[in-house]
Image: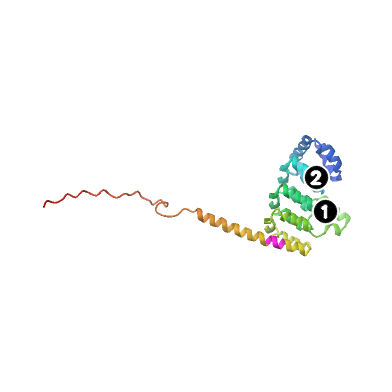
Amino acid sequence: MFTSIYDVLQLLALQDWETLRSTVLSDPTLFRNITNTISACSELNGMTLLHATVRFNPPLDMVAQMIRLCPLMTAATDCLGRTPLHVAAGSKASASLIKLIALACPAACDVQDGEGKTPLHFACDSSCVLFCEDHNRNDDENDASTSNQPPNHESIRALLSYSIHAATLEDDEEMTPLEHAIMSDASLKTVKLLQHATSKGMQLKKESKSFMTAMKMKSLPVQDDFTSGNYISWRPRKMARIMPTAA
């Protein structure tokens, strides 16, 4: 079985999408079996087939079909706490692919990995390299124009459309997505988008905190004699009948 998994991963690395369609995706039962085997394989460190696929910026219809067959993969995390959306954003996948995955699992936009990074952090950090092979490839090619491109505005906008909250989160380096974008020479348009999202996200967070405080205060018991435990059952004593005196 591991040989078949290896064959599938090789098809992904070669980006042989047509063969993958005809041999794996054409049979839903086989696809689910391979998906379950990959997820259970300890050598792959918790990676799902969707993690492995989105790394190579595959065709949208293929990813959509994978999600339809195994929708739970969109929320799965690997050993580093990363979802497929993290991998897509960190691998500089197309904005359309990022939007497709975020639509399938909006909650993944707010997931922070083992270093506190959300998919938005990765999308805003042009120096981000998730896989050793990619790092070595960039070193071998020595192509600065490829490895240091500024953050993709449309990818960032796609992520923010499903979660403004992610713009307010700091990673373990105490950096927000906005700060990563500035460090990555993002366009002024992108910086303004992130500034607006951060401001709005902070305001929503403040309003939510105020609302929760108000609800907590509202739910506190009223401290009076009847609720404080000091209540003592009391009723008036029956008045003794007074006998009239003789005239």
Q: Is residue 90 magenta?
A: no
Kind of residue sitting beneath label 1: His
Give the x, y percent position of residue 100.
76, 49
At mark 2, the secondary structure is: helix
The residue at the far bottom in this view is 188
Relative height, residue 54 to residue 197 (above, below): above
Q: Which residues are magenta?
A: 194-198
Label 1 crowd bin: few (<14), some (14–19), many (20+), radius 10 Å: few
Label 2 crowd bin: few (<14), some (14–19), many (20+), radius 10 Å: few
**Residue drawn at 77 percent across, 34 percent down:** 29
Which of the two residues, 42 or 189, is positioned nearer the viewer here? 189
Which of the two residues, 147 or 104, is positioned nearer the viewer here? 104
Which of the two residues, 35 or 217, is positioned nearer the viewer here? 217
Left or right: 109 as drawn, with respect to 62:
left
Q: Is residue 190 visible?
A: yes
State which quadrant residue 188 falls in: bottom right
Q: In front: mark 1 or mark 2?
A: 2
Give the x, y percent position of residue 126.
79, 58
Label 1: which residue?
135
